[in-house]
Image: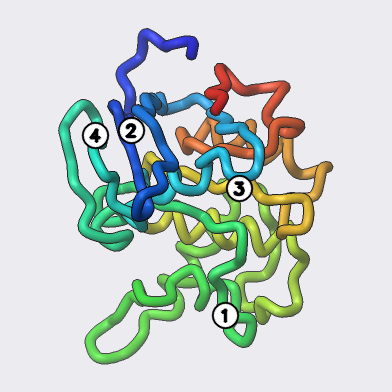
Amino acid sequence: MESSSAPAALALSRVTRSFGPVQILFDIDLELVAGEVHALIGENGAGKSTTMKILSGYLAASSGTILLDGRTVTFADSEAAENAGVVMIHQEFNLAGQLSVEENIFLGRELRRGPFLDKPAMREQARALLDQLECHVDVRTRLDAISVPDKQMVEIAKALLSADETDPTRSPSPSGPALADRFAHQTIQRMVELRIVESPTAKAAAPVQKWIAWQ
């Protein structure tokens, strides 16, 4: 692995993971540097998803250390990871099709003015988040009515809302809800500018990635 001189925003050190007698990860070292795009690439069963789940609190490591800005951390669950600024965007959408775009972005994090929802504030912030991603859907639109690439942007906007800097994202499989090719390069470039860490498909990452960790 080629290292960077910049400090790692998020790192794994000598991480292992076993499921019963079967060991999946063996002494994994991984450093994610803010402002760079990182690709985690390997065959099916290589341990990519397990690594991402450990980074984002969905699984505990059997041994080893997670470092956040150089500090050792332990995530009890994914909510603890999100509160620390680490968000994972899954291959499958975690969105409610019957709700509007803005309602999806703020689901579980609604803004209130007294006892009432502050819909104007949520609408304004949702629009600002999507503008950062150059996604121009009307935030009042029902989610079911927008395209798959725009749904992916809504997922990323949710991550931006809950975490300012760090965002490990699972690589979509060919049959999954991948970003459309014409949006991929533009999106990755924008994510670099926003200091989001992502693991996109190798094809999409090639023009801009700084280094690749092979398993």
Q: Are marks 4 and 3 in contact (CB under 8 Å)?
A: no
- Foreground mark, 4 or 3, reads 4
Q: Earlier in the sequence, mark 3 or mark 2?
A: 2
Q: Secondary structure at mark 3?
A: loop
Q: Secondary structure at mark 4?
A: strand
- Tell me the number on the disc at residue 64: 4
Q: In this figure, which residue is indicated by the disc labeled 1?
A: 96
The Cα atoms of the two marked residues, 3 and 2, are separated by 23 Å
The x, y position of residue 41, in whole percent, is 61, 32
Amino acid type of the residue tagged 1 in the rendering: Ala
Front position in the image: 66 or 215: 215
Residue 161 to residue 66: above or below: below
Q: Residues within 10 Å of mark 3 (few under 14, many from 20)?
A: many
Residue drawn at (48%, 36%), measured in percent from left and top? 197
Q: Are marks 1 and 3 in contact (CB under 8 Å)?
A: no
Residue drawn at (26%, 44%), measured in percent from left and top? 62
The Cα atoms of the two marked residues, 1 and 3, are separated by 20 Å
Q: Earlier in the sequence, mark 1 or mark 4?
A: 4
Residue 4 to residue 171: above or below: above
Q: Secondary structure at mark 2?
A: strand
The Cα atoms of the two marked residues, 2 and 4, are separated by 14 Å
Q: Secondary structure at mark 1?
A: loop
- Tell me the number on the disc at residue 133: 3
- Foreground mark, 1 or 3, reads 1
- Foreground mark, 2 or 4, reads 4
Q: Going by the image, does 206 lie left or right of 211?
A: right
Q: Are marks 3 and 2 in contact (CB under 8 Å)?
A: no
Amino acid type of the residue tagged 2 in the rendering: Leu
Q: In this figure, which residue is indicated by the disc labeled 2?
A: 10
The x, y position of residue 108, in whole percent, is 36, 76
